[in-house]
Image (cartoon, rainbow, N blue to C red):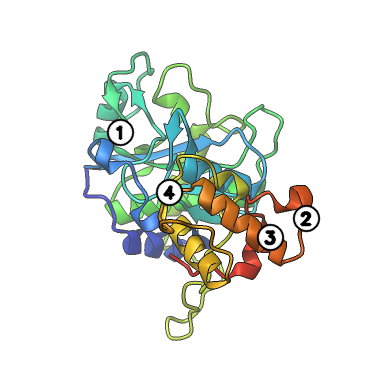
């Protein structure tokens, strides 16, 4: 049982364990804490995404979807072992699970069978989603398995937990199969061996004095981000840049809610760049977005 790590402490713990960490968008303030408690934390839960492709998987885990809003975990572990942080606080990843399993995790003893769903896991577990289709055929590269080992060990080391504080979603909630393609018993053996040694960072590191600052411009959030009902400071920043470029089509605003006025304004920007027809539909694309230089928010 422990107080959740701060964003800075989480990044430091992961990097100290040798991981390459990417801070995705506004992950430090992105959470579901308004829907329930976050902490005390008791362990780490491993999942697979049931998706392919790094960027699309990261975007999905950050945004979620209509039935399950994001973040859907705290970190996404790509095939190459890079960890993309997408949430800080309560996340929609564990759901309801077996209270007897939680008790075993707290006591750091062998897990019982998960046969009931009576306990809120989103409150008690950090969650990592590893990019994999989960069909039993999609491979698990050595770099990705090593990153899962390192990420789980980093949090165990930070909180003084043993490998028994790391579980799979399939060990928590009845009916779940993730992660599929390796066993959690074998992963816990790897984590135990790692915890028996000092951290051995191998990822490239940059001295603090020369570490680059946050990007000046907001990374392209994906075309699916721009849909009815979306509210984000990114939308406001986008609108202000469109106005600055002489493409604003607003009567009021711009504001944080994606609207028809935003779409019309972006279409004007696309036409300014020379796009025509369906290519000037008002939905941002990566190329036109990069030229607009929306400030990082």
Report helix, strand or loop for mark 1. helix
Residue for badge 4:
257
Question: Residue 51: where, in percent of width, then height?
Answer: 63, 36
Q: Callout 1: few (<14), some (14-19), or many (20+) C-alpha neighbours within 10 Å?
A: many
Report, in whole angstroms, how far the alpha carbon at label 3 lies from the one at label 4.
Answer: 20 Å
- The residue under label 2 is 276
Tell me, for residue 270, which label it has, or none. 3
**Percent position of residue 15, x then y:** 45, 64
Q: Which residue lies most toward the bottom here? A: 209
Q: Is residue 72 visible?
A: yes
- CB within 8 Å, label 3 to label 2: no
Discs 1/3, front: 3
SS for dot 2: loop
Vertically, is 117 above or below 156?
A: above
What's the CA distance linking mark 2 and mark 4?
A: 26 Å
Where is the C terminus found, in terms of image quarters?
bottom left
Say which residue label 1 marks. 105
Quadrant location of residue 246?
bottom right
Say which of 146 and 279 sits in front.
279
Q: Nearer the viewer, residue 121 or 197?
A: 121
Residue sitting at 32 percent across and 31 percent down? 121
For the residue pair 225 and 41, the one nearer the viewer reads as 225
Give yes or no for contact between labels 1 and 2 (Cβ–Cβ under 8 Å). no
Comparing labels 4 and 1, the label whose residue is closer to the camera? 4
Residue at position x 50%, y 66% in the image: 201
Q: CA distance from mark 4 to mark 1?
A: 42 Å
Q: Position of residue 75 (x, y in %)?
A: 46, 49
Q: CA distance from mark 3 to mark 2?
A: 8 Å
- Sequence-wise, which precedes: disc 1 or disc 3? 1
N-terminal label among 3 and 2: 3
Quarter of image, res 242: bottom right
């Amino acid at each position: 049982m422990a107080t959740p790590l701060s964003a800075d402490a989480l990044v430091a713990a992961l990097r100290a364990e040798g991981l390459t960490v990417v801070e995705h968008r506004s992950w430090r303030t992105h959470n579901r804490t308004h829907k329930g408690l976050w902490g005390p934390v008791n362990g780490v839960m491993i999942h697979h995404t049931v998706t392919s492709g790094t960027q699309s998987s990261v975007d999905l885990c950050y945004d979620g979807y209509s039935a399950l809003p994001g973040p859907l975990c705290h970190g996404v572990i790509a095939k190459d072992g890079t960890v993309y942080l997408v949430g800080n606080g309560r996340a929609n990843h564990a759901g309801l699970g077996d209270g007897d399993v939680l008790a075993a995790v707290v006591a750091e003893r062998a897990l019982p069978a998960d046969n009931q769903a009576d306990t809120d896991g989103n409150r008690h577990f950090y969650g990592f989603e590893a990019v994999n289709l989960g069909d039993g055929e999609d491979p698990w590269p050595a770099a990705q398995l090593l990153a899962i080992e390192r990420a789980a060990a980093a949090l165990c080391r930070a909180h003084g937990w043993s490998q028994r504080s790391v579980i799979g979603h399939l060990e928590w909630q009845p009916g779940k199969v993730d992660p599929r393609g390796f066993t959690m018993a074998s992963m816990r053996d790897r984590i135990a061996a790692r915890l028996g040694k000092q951290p051995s960072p191998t990822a490239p590191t940059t001295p603090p004095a020369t570490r680059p600052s946050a990007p000046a411009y907001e990374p392209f959030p994906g075309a699916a981000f721009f849909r009815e009902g979306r509210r984000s400071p990114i939308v406001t920043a986008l609108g202000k840049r469109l106005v600055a470029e002489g493409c604003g089509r607003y009567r009021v605003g711009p504001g944080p809610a994606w609207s028809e006025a935003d779409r019309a304004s972006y279409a004007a920007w696309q036409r300014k760049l020379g796009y025509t027809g369906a290519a000037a539909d008002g939905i941002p694309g990566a190329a036109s977005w990069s030229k607009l230089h929306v400030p990082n928010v």
